């Protein structure tokens, strides 16, 4: 698949890049995407939720009433889950939500996600962007020139570009990411993918 390289004004430069069919043209596997996204979201959970059980609640250990003759059920502790202020039955406990996925499955998931975006025609290639200092206006102008200013944009960089990355900080709809760190969730969550020239080679090398 060939894509024209655009400049920062959104005009074609006359150059083209080739997106490898081994990465951007595979038979997509929806279940692999599901598992990889599920793992990503699970890793975001802190798992620090906690409620007190009856042995952890503060309260008297005195027996509330005599065992028999009251006409009601037996009651031995104010800390019982049946009473207000008592412990909670089967409440949440701290836990680790992460789980393991095989490396090849994760690679398949990323290839599948990129294939879907390529088929949808939402991938753009722009020439290298050089900035002398962080400037949010420059990124806004780029998004407007590429007509993606009303979309969730994943900006894929071939290598670290500090000024460009800092320029995206105040824009909620642009997420810069290094090509080597692209994950399935970011790809599926974006409605437009803008790759700086060279990023496609990193992806081709990493996932082919």
Image: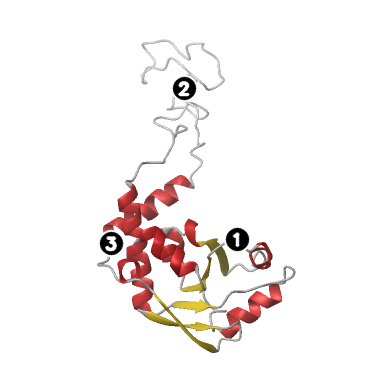
Dot 2 or dot 1, earlier in sequence? 2
Seen at 46% across and 73% down, the residue is 191
Residue in front for this viewpoint, 35 or 132:
132
- Nearer the observer, disc 3 or disc 2? 3
- Nearer the observer, disc 2 or disc 1? 1
Residue 111 in view (yes/no): yes
CA gap, disc 1 to disc 3? 31 Å
Seen at 47% across and 78% down, the residue is 124
Q: Name the mark on residue 108.
A: none
Question: Are the residues flagged by discs 2 and 1 in contact, CB closer than 8 Å?
Answer: no
Q: Secondary structure at mark 1?
A: loop
Residue in front for this viewpoint, 49 or 80:
49
Please name the residue that numbered disc 2 is placed on.
Answer: 54
Q: Quadrant of residue 166?
A: bottom right
Residue in front for this viewpoint, 52 or 131:
131
- Nearer the observer, disc 1 or disc 3? 1
The C terminus - image quarter: bottom left
The colour scheme used to paint the residues is: secondary structure
Please name the residue that numbered disc 3 is placed on.
Answer: 30
């Amino acid at each position: 698949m060939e894509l024209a390289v655009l400049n920062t004004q959104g005009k074609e430069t006359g150059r083209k890049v080739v997106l490898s069919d081994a990465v951007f043209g595979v038979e997509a596997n929806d279940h692999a995407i599901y598992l990889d996204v599920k793992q990503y979201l699970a890793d975001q959970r802190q798992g620090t939720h906690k409620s007190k059980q009856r042995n952890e609640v503060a309260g008297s250990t005195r027996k509330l009433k005599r065992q028999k003759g009251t006409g009601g059920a037996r009651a031995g502790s104010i800390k019982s889950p049946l009473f207000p202020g008592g412990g909670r039955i089967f409440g949440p406990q701290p836990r680790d939500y992460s789980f393991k996925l095989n490396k090849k499955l994760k690679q398949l998931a990323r290839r599948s996600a990129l294939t879907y975006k390529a088929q949808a025609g939402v991938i753009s290639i722009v020439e290298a962007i050089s900035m002398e200092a962080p400037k949010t206006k420059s990124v806004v102008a780029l998004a407007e020139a590429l007509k993606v200013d009303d979309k969730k944009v994943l900006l894929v960089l071939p290598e670290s570009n500090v000024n460009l990355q800092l320029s995206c900080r105040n824009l909620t709809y642009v997420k810069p990411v290094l090509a080597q760190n692209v994950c399935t969730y970011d790809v599926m969550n974006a409605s437009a993918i803008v790759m700086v020239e060279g990023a496609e080679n990193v992806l081709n090398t990493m996932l082919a």
